Image (spheres, rainbow, N blue to C red):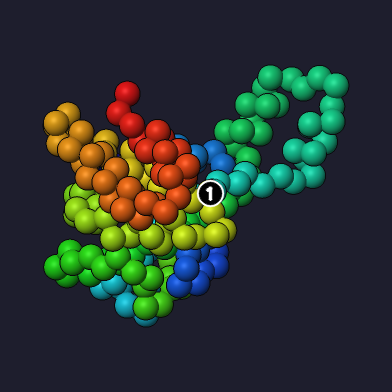
Amino acid sequence: MVGTQEQLMVGRVLRASTRGFACGTQSNRVDNKHDFGAFVSAPIANDDTIQAVGLIYAVEIKDDLLVNELVMADAVNASILRDQRENRMVPMEISVLNIGYRYTANGAVVHSLPPRPPMSLSQVDLCTSEVILEFTRRQDFFPLVLNAAEVPSDDLLAAAIRYASWQHDDQQARYEFLVRCGRAIARQLSHDLKRLEHVLALIRPA
């Protein structure tokens, strides 16, 4: 997992609430830090010792007048396309669903909405493997994802589980983690067998 502050930075907060937040960056910086289901964190308002933890559930690359003109053109030179993608500062917006928070002093995690949202322009970072492993040691945050109406909740939870499983170096540990998650989902969705079957199929080991 990447380690330096610059490598971990996903973007900066545009707007936020206790339920989630949106952050922005440049489209030419998009990489695996911006994957659907990735775990990210940002300090809550006026307290750097508490980090809101969330999952990326949407990534949108904004258009502008030049992009609209290029799309309508009959033919576009390859060098122009390359310059548009690599050099121009086209904004990208990342939407995050809050699933808990952690105390930076001792690493303690709480699977509940944070007490306050992050402030505008706060730095949003990709969570390290250590933070993800500690945060997913329990599955108490699953209801926050499954009950979130504004996100593709089933796919998001499955993507987050797969993402977290990759943080386990040992294949057996990865398999056991997926089994624990499957059992937790079964308890949450025992009343909806069709939905349960769908989510379990999304996390089933290949």
Is residue 24 visible in the rendered image? The answer is no
**Which residue in the structure is indicated by mark 1?**
152
Of the pair 85 and 170, the residue shown nearer to us = 170
Name above or below for residue 27 compared with residue 137.
Answer: above
Q: Quadrant of the N terminus?
A: top left
Name above or below for residue 106 compared with residue 179.
Answer: below
Three-letter amino acid code at the position of disc 1: Pro
In the rendering, at what x and y percent does residue 61 appear?
62, 44
Q: Quadrant of the C terminus?
A: top left
Of the pair 162 and 93, the residue shown nearer to us = 162
Count of residue discs: 1
Name above or below for residue 77 compared with residue 52.
Answer: above
Of the pair 5 and 205, the residue shown nearer to us = 205
Examine the image and state in which quarter residue 28 appears: top right
For image coordinates 35% across by 55% down, the residue present is 188
For image coordinates 48% across by 51% down, the residue present is 153
Is residue 194 visible in the rendered image? The answer is yes
In the rendering, at what x and y percent does residue 95 appear?
52, 55
For image coordinates 51% across by 69% down, the residue present is 16
